[in-house]
């Protein structure tokens, strides 16, 4: 809670007034069942602020499920997180279009979420194949990268 002083018409402070920070509530629905949720669940915010669901669905079905969650509870922002990877162009584009119509936000990686981890360390403007991500992450982390690690957020934060 922040404290602010109320100014009088004479320019000096009369008394303190309590001001609350406005806290938004986020829902993050993820294509992956473990990798993405493990990252987002470790954000240093109260669990009441961010709810994370790892659904294991294609992009279009992910957006459909996000609608169902929205209908059950009130969220200030809903994010749909998925990979571009092997989904059809039609499904991928439909998911983005549908999410925008619903007021959802989209975060997608091309090719996989591990690219996001690499971008914590360095800017990439060249193609790095998906098969190289684990090797590259192992080198950047200083130990073997373990997919679906519960500790990845803290490891990235410490680097």
Image (cartoon, grey):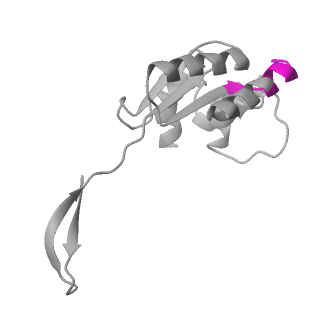
41 or 80: nearer the viewer = 80
Location of residue 124 in the rendering, given as x and y in whole percent from the top left corner: 77, 45
Please say if 50 is above or below 56: below
Where residue 36 sits, quadrant-wise, is top right
Image mark count:
0
Residue 8 in sight? yes
Residue 91 colored in magenta in the image: yes
Location of residue 91 in the rendering, given as x and y in whole percent from the top left corner: 80, 19
Residue at image position (63%, 44%) is 121
Residue that extends furthest to the bottom in the rendered view of this protein: 10
Please say if 151 is above or below 54: below
Q: Is residue 87 left or right of residue 144?
A: right
Location of residue 30 in the rendering, given as x and y in whole percent from the top left corner: 60, 22
The part of the chain drawn in magenta is 82-93
Residue that extends furthest to the left in the rendered view of this protein: 15
Residue 31 in sight? no
Residue at image position (46%, 34%) is 154
Q: Is residue 98 left or right of residue 45?
A: right
Residue at image position (32%, 51%) is 21
88 or 37: nearer the viewer = 88
Location of residue 79 in the rendering, given as x and y in whole percent from the top left corner: 58, 32
Q: Is residue 127 left or right of residue 25?
A: right
Residue at image position (57%, 23%) is 29
Q: Is residue 155 left or right of residue 8?
A: right
Please say if 91 is above or below 124: above
């Amino acid at each position: 809670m922040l404290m602010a002083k109320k100014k009088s018409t004479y320019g000096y402070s009369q008394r303190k007034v309590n001001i609350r920070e406005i806290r938004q509530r986020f829902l993050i629905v993820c294509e992956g069942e473990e990798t993405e949720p493990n990252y987002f669940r470790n954000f240093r915010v109260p669990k009441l602020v961010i709810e994370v669901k790892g659904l294991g669905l294609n992009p279009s079905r992910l957006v459909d499920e996000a609608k169902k969650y929205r209908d059950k509870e009130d969220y200030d922002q809903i994010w749909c997180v998925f990979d571009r990877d092997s989904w059809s162009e039609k499904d991928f584009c439909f998911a983005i279009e549908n999410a925008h119509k619903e007021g959802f936000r989209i975060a997608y990686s091309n090719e996989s979420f591990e690219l996001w981890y690499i971008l914590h360390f360095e800017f990439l403007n060249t193609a790095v194949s998906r098969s190289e991500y684990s090797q590259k992450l192992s080198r950047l982390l200083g130990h073997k990268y373990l997919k679906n690690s519960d500790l990845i957020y803290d490891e990235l934060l410490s680097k």
